[in-house]
Image (cartoon, rainbow, N blue to C red):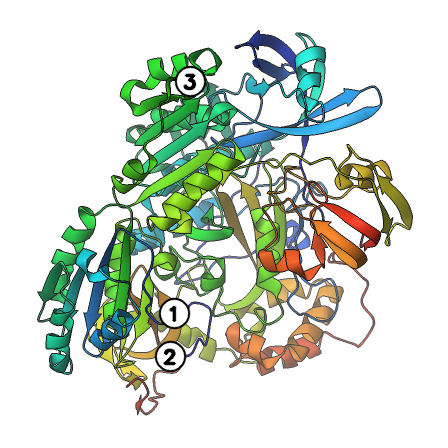
Amino acid sequence: MGINFRKETFRDDFTFRNSPEFVRRFPFPFHEDAYMYAVNIEPHVPGPEGSVLENLIDVDEHYVAEMEDRALVLAEDPLRCQSLPHMTLAGWDLLELLMTEQANGYPEHFSLSRDGDRWRWINRPLGIDDTFTFGDVSTLPYGPMEYITRQSQGDFCILDQRDGNLWMDAGMVTTQADWSLDFDIGMNFFEWHAPVPLAHEKGIFTRALKFLTNIQQGKPARRLNWTMTINPRLDTSPENYHKWGTDRMTVTPENVGDKVHLRVELQSFWRLPRSNALVFPIRCYLIKMDELVTSPKWARRLHRVLRDLPQELADYKGLTRYRPTVVEWLSKHDDGAPTSAGFGPD
Amino acid sequence: MPAQTIKSRPVYGTLSPQAGKSHLFVADAEGGSAILDLARQAPEGFFGAAHIMFIPGRTGDSLLAALKALKPAQYYEGPSIAAAIPRLKQTLATAHMGLRIYLSGTEGLIGQAMQAALESGIDHTSIQTEHRGSLARRVQCVHCKGITEDVTTQPATCAHCGLLLLVRDHYSRRIAAFQGVCINAEDPTEIPQKEEMFR
Amino acid sequence: MSTGTTKLNVTVTEVVAVNELVKRFHFERTDGGDLPTFSGGAHVVVEMRDDGRTRLNPYSLMSSPLNTRDYTISVRRDDVGRGGSLFMHNRVRRGTEMVISYPVNLFSLDLRAKKHLMIAGGIGITPFMAQTSQLAAEGGNFELHYTCRTPALGTYTDVLAQRYGRRVQLYYDDRNEKLPLERLLASQPLGTHLYICGPAGMIRWVRETAAAQGWPDETVHYEHFAAPQPGAPFDVTLAVSGNQIRVGEQQSLLKAIEAAGVDPPYLCRGGVCGQCETNVISHDGVFRHNDHWLSEEDHCSGKKIMPCVSRFEGSSLVLER
């Protein structure tokens, strides 16, 4: 039995939704009733069966629709996928990682066979069956990073490691929370995080960098990040901000449940073997408020987190205009009862 | 001098003579005087292995005689940054390790010369920079990707697509520009007043 | 959370005497599987169990990074060192089962370089064996300059000359051949990166010459694992675990901490990776810092020590371990 891939959209008529079992596995990001930055990094090891951590590279019911949306974004704006010239080797590393993990985790959907450097990759959901020479870019229709990330959920940043810093030197970024790969490519760890408020002063990035530069092969790590999105729109890029920004004006007490989404990023960090680069997959999960409040614990907790969020963070995350409406709506789902520890629904 | 507001906003230093086999100076307008200040502490014979590229602009003419008097091995005077870039790229393409680079003047000059140097394989941290003169910004519109030169107001109008842009301190060395993001995307009826901010 | 390395169980499949000082060891996975791919310049830490003592020495991988069947290292016999190389030479043979770490790269190529200029001295050739294989496979632009004492002690000179022809230049001390360093550095195109591996004196000479000629620090890469130096025994209090330990003359502080049952993270055990950095709570005495990790400022502060290679002389030392 495989995954039943949904036919749905992340634009125009926005038919995206989660089936009930996917609501239960949603990676809710708050382990307590308040939120502040922390270096919340932990080993990326497999989690319970049925959770988004069952496989280290997660494929879910939105796979096919997300890949279709990515193809639309790239057709409109090819600058969303870029790789500086020295990053091709890291692209091959990433191709190997994603093919191997997807084929191991979902053998009914993907298979990889290797005969020396002659590889055959079958991707059944997308109807792909390609034979190519590993390391030879002329045998693939795209560069190795673009080829495999057109077939993998989530955004991908590949970071070159030099001089004790990490450099954003390649990426496939079509579902970002409001940052521009085209602008940030080539920047170091502190520079591309420059617009983030509060965290620099807390020394968060200095500690995080020290940790990340020491990540070793075979020992990936992960963290969760979150924001909110109006409508289930994956492409909330700054490039198109003038097209989707008005969505934020459309939130009313009547439509919060369907329109407002919690957006969680499962970020993982992997050392790549041939290039010694670090890859940073940013896997995005969306959940409607109507879906989220089916867990009373999540409803109570999200209400308290949003209500008490410092204003700088609310501004940075773009929540300012609609936060009061959402907090008011969520308050009806918060009876004040205590919440249990941990992330999961009750 | 521009203050560092966020970590991507470049900070500039004061030019000083570096150990090296040869020295390339690129300056515009008041930036020429930074070369003259460096010359006071340069060792004997320093300019014998130096190449000065100077774009006087509207305010640099008074420095021409003094710069020539340094007797650099090569001296060039250009009418604009754009006109000087091909010569700079050719100089870098044939240069050897041991070349040191010194950039002084407006942020636009420093940014565009640095962009050429980065492409030739030099790390930005090994390049000496000193800001003098105008604080006008080069701004890239994140929406249409067009670059607007000499931006002095906040917000500013994109010269290419016409959107009203918030000029951020977020800066890209690769593009040699600050980022401009539509200021009224959420409510296009809000039209904030422009103020002179970057002089 | 601590990083640190994952371990691999391997079996020695071949031991080759390369010349009178150097032996080469081939490792395969004991379970028959593939080894992890690595990048040129990576090392593994080899665990040596020697009558109840465990030695942990880093060695550069010298096989092609694309070969995942076996790893090879070369070990130069050091008759006066702490015995790791003697153990490898005298006790390890074909069929010996050993434990090694996952590959870790602290001497990575900068793939942006327009050209890679490599300078090796003696056994410092080993990381370049892997890096040149990697670059040659990708059509990379490199040049290797290699100084050896005598042709008989020129480890792998024949292999390199055969593989790369004029891209490899050899210099023999006994023929009075000297690396023309100043001329070599002055003639490199802009965008060249310099890599150095060899004796400490050679690394210093090349770095200083490059700096004087205006090579930016970012373009100069060197690998020098400091071997822990022996020294007078000293006593240490480990405040967190509540241990009193004595560091022996031939023992490193890190080994002594581990012997007390406390396991700080490590990757290189050579003063380079920074993993085992330890806070000093109080001290009365003088530090003997031997690492390449802490800044000059840290060394002077008396607040940090790298226990893998550094020592202490004085009446009391309390560490946050």
Residue lying at 67% horizontally and 17% vertically, measured from the top left? C88
Q: Is residue C132 above or below residue B16?
A: above
Read off the chain for label 3: C
Three-letter amino acid code of the residue under disc 1: Pro
Nearer to us of marks 1 and 3 is 3
Mark 3, residue position? C174
Contact (Cβ within 8 Å) of mark 2 with mark 1? yes
**Residue B32: % across, % down:** 20, 74
Left or right of B124? Residue A60 is right
Q: Residue at x 62, y 9 (%)?
A: C13
Determine whether, in the image, residue A230 is placed left or right of residue A339: left
| Precedes in sequence: disc 2 or disc 1 | 2
Q: Residue B10 has which mark?
A: 1
Q: Mark 2 and 3 residues: CB-CB less than 8 Å, in contact?
A: no
* Kind of residue at disc 3: Asp
Q: CA distance from mark 2 to mark 3?
A: 58 Å
Mark 2 vs mark 1, CA separation in Å: 9 Å
Left or right, A308 with reference to B9: right
